[in-house]
Image (cartoon, grey):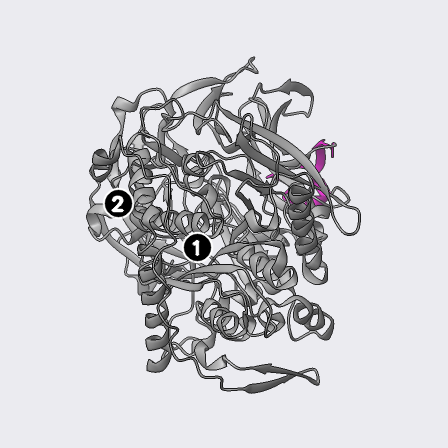
Amino acid sequence: MKRNPGGTLAANGPKISSSIGVLFSKKSVAGGVLLALMLATCILAAQQPAGKPLPPLPATPKKPVIDVYHGIKVEDDYQWLENWNDPAVRAWSNEENRRARAFLASLPARNAIDQRLLALARKTSASYGDFQYRNGFLFALKFQPPKQQPFLVTLKSPNDTASERMVVDPNRIDPSGTTAIDFYVPSRDGKLVAVSLSKGGSENGALHVYRVSTGEPLPDVIPRVNKGTAGGSAAWNDDGTGFYYTRYPSPGERPVKDLDFYQQIYFHKLGAPVSEDTYSLGKKFPRIAEIALQSSPDGRYILATVANGDGGQFEHFLVGPQGQWTQITHFQDGITQAVFGEDSALYLLSQKGAPRGSIVLIPLSQPSLASARTIVPQAEDVIQSFVPVAHRLYVTDIWGGPSDVRVFSLEGHTLGKVLLDPVSAVNGLIALSGDTLLFQSESYLRPPAWYEVTAGSLKPIRTALWTEPAVNFSDTEVIRALARSEDGTRVPMTILMRKGTQLDGENPTLLTGYGGFGISLTPSYSFSRRVWLDQGGIWVIANLRGGGEYGEEWHREGMLTKKQNVFDDFTACAEYLIGKRYTSPKKLAIEGGSNGGLLMGAALTQHPGLFRAVVSFVGIYDMIREEITTPNAVFNTTEFGTIQNLRDFRALLAYSPYQHVKNGVAYPAVLFFTGANDPRVNPMQSRKMTARLQAASSSGLPILLRTSANTGHIQSSLNEELMEIADMDAFLFRELGVKVRLAPLKESSY
């Protein structure tokens, strides 16, 4: 759960665990999957049996431990499940995993859904993302099944796919498909590229250097550059002879408990031993600092953006030709983004007195907020991102979820809006040469495509980089609705359903949300939703407080001691759907991941009768113990609060799902997913919550724990992701009483 990413600041998005329902909008599936060919005309029988009886539960003894916080006693029967080094814990986890997999495999719809997803993946063309422009070349991460991971390519133009050249392919480096690119940074001349690689979802990345023209690796390998706590980053100097990079402490430099903290900036000269790398900045940064680096277009300046954990506070440091770092903003200044312009200026997104954002400019010759001038004042919509080009400034706005793009002169004069589809999202603004902008846009009904906007035009032109749709959503309607939360706040949501769906309270409905870290759930395309809609299902995305859909005020109303607002908003959305007869409690399921997994835990413990089934990915459930047991949780204290503070502790304890499971309550069916290598949320969270619910629930409904040995929090292979969706869908269809029918792919909906 990170707000700030690895790699260069301008090119990255938030490193969060995406809700699995929008999985393929974040990592668009493309290319061929041969295993699916045989299923292209399959019809699954209309009647779906309930599956085999659940295997017996493993022995799960209660071993009560009482901890005292601020004089308050907290009893924990399953604290022993936190210790992954205990053979008994591993044996218990393995038995739970076997139980879950055996049950899921017994569901007749499960394999057919898996094969259908593979078939749809085959029908989708390649997708591109994380673009960076250097010296006339585009660098991009390309995803093309059946390859398991995205790989790094170059293009001469977004309209010249024939010019594509492979640079680094982790699928060749590791045929098992578990090695991933964390981030990459090309040199200014585009001849070299630094790439962080990590394995098994660990995010424990080392930086490798490759020659772009040949893909040849150089001997330079820098360890401890990227981790799941503060991410990682790098930025080249002007002549490509070396780069600044983020570095975590080496064993022996600090105590073991601090090796995931105290990120600092070092400089590496190409060809020199790592032992000769020189310290540059960071000794005075907070223990939970998260650093992102970027180079100016001319290579003369390096900017370091430093986050104070995950709560949304940033400060910025600049080093120029003189070789001295200068601090230009502080945490209290409210500057959340900074981007170099082509005009020897630094453009800053300010929330100081402007919670929806304003853009200010400071000259690099006078790098101080005292010299800043406002060029885009706060408006009604929320500024999400921006990029300056030669003579224009493009600004992406959000209001409740969908995006707009405003265009300004560099002096701040309004030039109009880019023409976009309604209820769509804009991602990845990339400055090309001159006044040309490259950006990605997608909607709930239309897959991602990359567009160009050139000088003097507001009409985007689609490039050759667009995703061939695997399915047709022309029969689907997109409804924007507002629920009223407990305190009267109006909470937006998007409802996806087939046209003509009867609102009789009998529709199987899946509600998802996130609500944290200022992250917005924006319109996204996912071919996997087609399977759900074809069963008469409804899919709903809730835009909850804690996110950034309405700016920093919306975020702050769902963080720290106000976190309960997020759960109330989600409950209000569920009650709206029931009240308007889209669905009913027996037909309503919920799903979320990471911070959204916490949301799932709170929803099912606070309102167990409101939902029939819950699917939760890599979630936090014991808010009291996570900070003690997981390094990344310390970074989250600026978002959630800390147990060290009495006020925060009381708020955390008041909603912490694990502590609010009650014996004898009829809880809904629950499927927990976790990855054994998760560096962000300790897998013990899922183990403890599973054990507690299995002991407490009186409903007799299944409570399952599925643990993957080769995944982490945000990284997994294509096959693993497809299997997770198939497991989720089969589980939910069973619990909601859906008679699954998969029509032939040649039918109109495909």
Q: Does residue 375 sit above or below 551 in this rendering?
A: above
Residue 457, position in %: x, y? Answer: 55, 13
Q: Are the two marked residues, 2 and 1, in contact with CB atoms closer than 8 angstroms?
A: no
Q: How far apart are marks 2 and 1 (CA)?
A: 18 Å
Q: Does residue 557 sit above or below 55 in this rendering?
A: above
Query: Residue at 24% of width from left, 37% of height from top?
Result: 36
Q: Nearer the viewer, residue 332 or 268?
A: 332
Foreground disc of the pair 2, 1 = 1
Residue 567, position in %: x, y? Answer: 66, 55
Q: Kindly indicate the quadrant of the structure image that contains residue 708.
A: bottom left
Residue 234 in view: no
Query: Residue at 60% of width from left, 83% of height from top?
Result: 75
Bounds of the magenta span? 359-379
Q: What element carries label 1?
A: loop
Residue wearing tag 2: 210
Residue 339, position in %: x, y? Answer: 56, 39
Query: Residue at 72% of width from left, 63% of height from top?
Result: 561
Q: Nearer the viewer, residue 210 or 628?
A: 628
Residue wearing tag 1: 232
Q: Does residue 9 sit above or below 291 in this rendering?
A: above
Indicate left or right for 505 with 211 as reference. Answer: right
Q: Which of 256 and 568 is in front in this view?
A: 568
Residue 120, position in %: x, y? Answer: 33, 34
Q: How crowded is mark 2: few (under 14 residues within 10 Å), some or many (20 or more)?
A: many
Name the kind of residue labelled 1 in the image: Gly
